[in-house]
Amino acid sequence: MSSPLALLGGPPVIDVPGPHFAWPPIDDSDVEAVTGQLMSAVSVPDRSGVVAELEDALASLLGVRHVVTTSTGTAALHSMYAAAGIGPGDEVIVPALTFHATATPLFHLGARPVLADVNEHGQLDLNDAARRITLRTKAVVAVHLWGLPENMDNLISFTARHNLMLLEDGSHAHGATWRGQPVGSFGRAAAFSMNGPKPLSAGEGGCVATDDTELYYRVLLHGQYNKRCRREIPADHPLAPYAVTGMGLKLRIHPLAAALAHSQLPRLESFLTGREAVAAQMCKALRGVPGIAVPHPPPHARPAWYALPLRYHPEQLAGLPVERFIEALHAEGAVETDLPGSTRPLGDHQLFRTPGALLPGYADHQGQPADSFANARRVHGSTLKLPVWHREKGLHLAESYTTAIIKVAEHHKDLVT
Ligand SMILES: *Cc1c(COP(=O)(O)O)cnc(C)c1O
């Protein structure tokens, strides 16, 4: 057995102080791209320059006809829903366990996010989703949580059977594929974040991807008014007269952010293969460790490994509470292990319970009873989230983290008695 737990006075596994994971990795080519952009243009009002280059590269990565970049992923989701025609009284089924911005833009369209519980893998429970369909239900959102692709076979047949629109939030999953097809290319449209820690980072940014040209025009009208709309929406199109004002919102990406993402994009494939190797090593080391279950994506899914979500089973560790397990891990120096913070059961947020205090249009909105999302709560409360490093240097840290987990699991009895 290894040395005593650091929490009980033993030597820690990791003695390098954190943070142990930083993202995105910035190299000379990023500095050159961003400073080059700074010297050439700091505002791009139409689809030209670095904005066009980034959108073309993203469209080619995702295998879609159109991509529109936005200021954030939240803005991308807002534009996607607006462009998909989601409006007052419409209901959209959203998994109860995701980042809140998957659903919150719906409040700004007068629509209702209808939360549906998740299954044991944290993915949409289609039986629960089916029970929540009403005459007002318009769409279902697939979220590829932690970069693990949703089961798109099931989602496609579900939405086809119920005649619902399929939309995607790919914010954790740039470059992930299902049966070789990129996530974000399955639904009518997809939204992505390119926020700081996301697999493809602009610092701040987002995008909408779609094959649907009409929807594309509406994305432009939602958040990219004037020049871009005037130049891209054909003059004889019925919506062309709206080009100058659009729908009144301005949600464009900053060109310096676009330059960063454009510079990062050619390295995405090597980030993904690096993360794949590190995730495989971590899963291999942890397989069979009592109290810890590693994810098992199907062989035809290629995850982006935004994080490694481990499931904690206290019943295999004499009931040791997950909080105590994490405390022990932190003492071992594995400081970047935690329960997911902002990705949590949406029903827990005040905005989903009583939105009316902030959004007067929702004064009558009845929050869904929190106990209807038992799996979302259970999965969230037992997910240990670890960073997945992407290169050689990370292999050593990844090994130290799994060593720390194995050590705490081996010594769990010392913490229970
Ligand atoms: C990050 C994230 C968002 C929001 O993106 P921002 O760029 O932070 O606005 C939406 N959905 C998911 C799943 C996310 O992880």
Image (cartoon, rainbow, N blue to C red):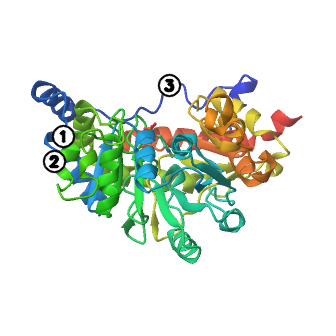
Residue 130's label in the rendered image is none
Q: How far is disc 3 from disc 1 in space, using C-alphas?
A: 51 Å
Circle 1 Cα neighbour tier, 10 Å, few/some/many (<14 / 14–19 / ≥20): some
Q: How far is disc 1 from disc 2 in space, using C-alphas?
A: 6 Å
**Residue sitting at x 70%, y 62%:** 132
- Res. 159 image quadrant: bottom right
Residue 227's label in the rendered image is 1
Instruction: State yes or no: discs 1 and 2 in contact (Cβ < 8 Å).
Output: yes
Percent coordinates x, y for residue 77 in the rendering: 45, 46
Q: What residue occupies the far right of the structure in this picture?
A: 417
Circle 3 Cα neighbour tier, 10 Å, few/some/many (<14 / 14–19 / ≥20): few
**Residue 406, placed above or below residue 159:** above
Residue under pointer 3: 16
Q: Amino acid at mark 1?
A: Lys
N-terminal of the pair, mark 3 or mark 1, is 3
Q: Amino acid at mark 2?
A: Arg
**Residue 253, placed above or below residue 270:** above
Front position among marks 2 and 3 = 2
Residue under pointer 2: 231
